[in-house]
Amino acid sequence: MHRKAGKDPTLKILVRLLSALVLCAWSTPLAHAVAPFYEGKTIKLIVGFSAGGGFDTYSRLIARHLGRHIPGNPAIVVENMTGAASLLAANHVYKVAKPDGLTILNFHGNQVINQVIGKPGIEFDARKFEYIGIPTQDNVACGFTKASGITTFDALRNAKTPVKIGGVAPGDTTYNTTKLLLAALKLPIQLVAGYKGTAEVRLAAEAGEVAGGCWQWESIKSIWRQGLDSGNVFIVLQVNAKPHPELAKVPNAVDFAANDNAKQILKFGGHDPAAITRPYAVAPGTPKDRVQLLRKAFTETLKDPEFIADAKRSRLDTDPLTGEEIEKIVLQLFKIEPGMVSQLKEILK
């Protein structure tokens, strides 16, 4: 008499063993297809700004946690490559770095709008980078020292002599925001550019070389915390599409724009690029499986309780975008109406 497989213990065991072998045969190559590449490797995270500034602070925070979420647990080393508001770093990764997933770029998203308006020196196509993610969407604020006398927006707009504002270089928020405020609000301000990063702008303000600077609130409240807490630094203006909850009582530049054209200057030159200020990307041609792996790891890192606790200790906000979301915004910036592109080109030259 024949026994049914379901009632024969020996057959049951054999079926289970065969099923397990088949599963292993399929799952093992998939699970380890990418992991061996990163095992024992070091990822270089190139930051386009100086140590101690906002970009550097975020990147070092991310570097402390990202490796745990990448199969193979690679080491991650942060390198600062300063020059032209991260343009040097962006050009380097685009042209020189191997597209192997071992070099991650953190550059300034305003370089995207600089490509749109045809700024010289750009040797990359922002549409071809493989974007990994963004830790936070930025909000821009202008901070001034108490010693400068600019402690309110009225003091700024009624100043009898041009108020010196520190900046880095074309493409950086410190630079572009000052230019946009000059064009849209006609404020009595003077851009003093050439600093390596926001850390240097802060030091210059404290030394009295400039009155202050305009850059990401998420960075200001971290690296200029002591000045804010002591009452030696005042936030007198924000440059955002809508008021930031923490700056509810601070005047917003768009509310003082005289007409729709001025509002569009602030929108396309400032508000929209602010969403992608801090992109992380790898070179064009990086294998798609590694791009997807890094994107997944980046997203998981920003949800990691240890990362979140570390960010809170550093007073750093998180409001992330995925690599796919960055790609969409970048492509939209290349669709700005030609007339506005011409205006922005003149303003940001």
Image (spheres, helix red, strand yellow):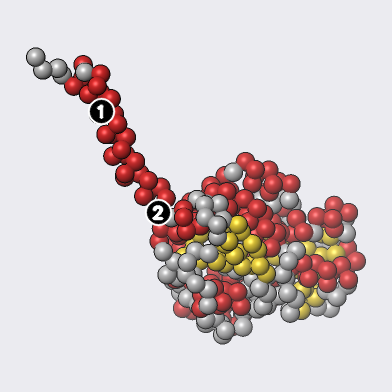
Label 2 sits on a secondary structure element that is loop
Label 1 sits on a secondary structure element that is helix
Q: Name which quarter of the figure residue 76 lies in.
A: bottom right
Residue occupying image coordinates x 41% and y 47% = 31
Q: Residue furthest right?
A: 147
Mark 2 and 1 residues: CB-CB less than 8 Å, in contact?
Answer: no
Q: Which residue is mark 2?
A: 33
Residue closer to the observer: 5 or 162: 5
- Residue 300 visible in image: yes
Q: Which residue is mark 1?
A: 14
Q: Is residue 7 left or right of residue 114?
A: left
Dot 2 or dot 1: first in sequence order is 1
- Expressed as whole percent of the image width and height from the top left, the position of residue 233 reads 84, 60
Circle 2 packing at 10 Å, graded few (<14), some (14-19), many (20+), is: few
Query: Between marks 2 and 1, how big is the CA–CA gap?
Result: 29 Å
- Expressed as whole percent of the image width and height from the top left, the position of residue 214 reads 72, 67
Residue occupying image coordinates x 63% and y 56% = 63
- Residue 158 visible in image: no
Question: Could you tell me the amino acid type at mark 1?
Answer: Leu
Circle 1 packing at 10 Å, graded few (<14), some (14-19), many (20+), is: few
- Expressed as whole percent of the image width and height from the top left, the position of residue 228 reads 83, 55
Q: Name which quarter of the figure residue 268 lies in.
A: bottom right
Residue occupying image coordinates x 73% and y 50% = 315
Question: Could you tell me the amino acid type at mark 2?
Answer: Ala
